Structures are given as C-alpha cells and as structure tokens.
Amino acid sequence: MGNGKEDAATKGAATMKTYHIYLEDKCLFKDLNQQEFDVIWGRIYRSYFKDDLTYTMCEGDVCEKGEIFEASF
C-alpha cells in the first residue's frame, strides 16, 4: 500500500500516448512522446517521402494508424 501517488503515476504511464514513425513499413522512430513526434513529423513529413511516411499512435497496448491531413493552399 502506498500513499496513492505511485498508483496515479502508474496509471498515467500506462495510458501515455506514444508515436512510431515508419518509412515504407520500416520503423524510423519508436516510442516518441507528443512533443518529440510533433517536431520530427513536422520536419520530415514536409520535406521527404510524403507518400511513404506513416505513423501510428499507441495508448497502452493499443496502436492505431494515424490519419494524414494535408492543408490545401
């Protein structure tokens, strides 16, 4: 039995979102947090291999393929 802080920290870690970035189904980056993902995705997606880059967002043991939206200018 703890003081409750450990339980809250454990629950938060279990539901933390992570991201994986793939190039042609090969994992380039794994277990990125939101901030890391935003920086890396923003730089490589705008510059390289747009048709071949994908990502997944994972929460716990569940991963979903991300949807890529392009701005129309």
Image: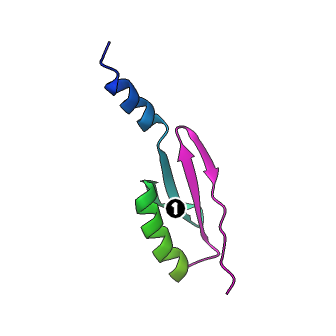
Q: Residue furthest left?
A: 3
* Element marked by disc 1: strand
Residue 36 in the image: state x and y as whole percent.
40, 61
Task: Please tell me which residue is depicted at 61% across the width and 72% down the height of the picture.
Answer: 52
For the N terminus, give its image quadrant: top left
Q: Residue furthest bottom?
A: 73
Asked if 38 appears above or below 63 in the picture, the reply is below
Q: What residue span does the magenta drawing correspond to?
A: 48-73
Task: Please tell me which residue is depicted at 49% across the width and 69% down the height of the picture.
Answer: 41
36 relative position to 17: left or right: left
Asked if 12 appears above or below 47 in the picture, the reply is above
Whether 60 is among the magenta residues is yes
Identify the image quadrant of residue 3: top left
Identify the image quadrant of residue 66: bottom right
Residue 21 in the image: state x and y as whole percent.
52, 61
Residue 29 in the image: state x and y as whole percent.
45, 60
Asked if 11 appears above or below 47 in the picture, the reply is above
Task: Please tell me which residue is depicted at 46% across the width and 62% down the height of the picture.
Answer: 37
Task: Please tell me which residue is depicted at 43% across the width and 36% down the height of the picture.
Answer: 12
For the C terminus, give its image quadrant: bottom right
Residue 72 in the image: state x and y as whole percent.
69, 82
Asked if 30 appears above or below 44 in the picture, the reply is above
- Describe the colour scheme in one phrase: rainbow
What residue does disc 1 label? 21
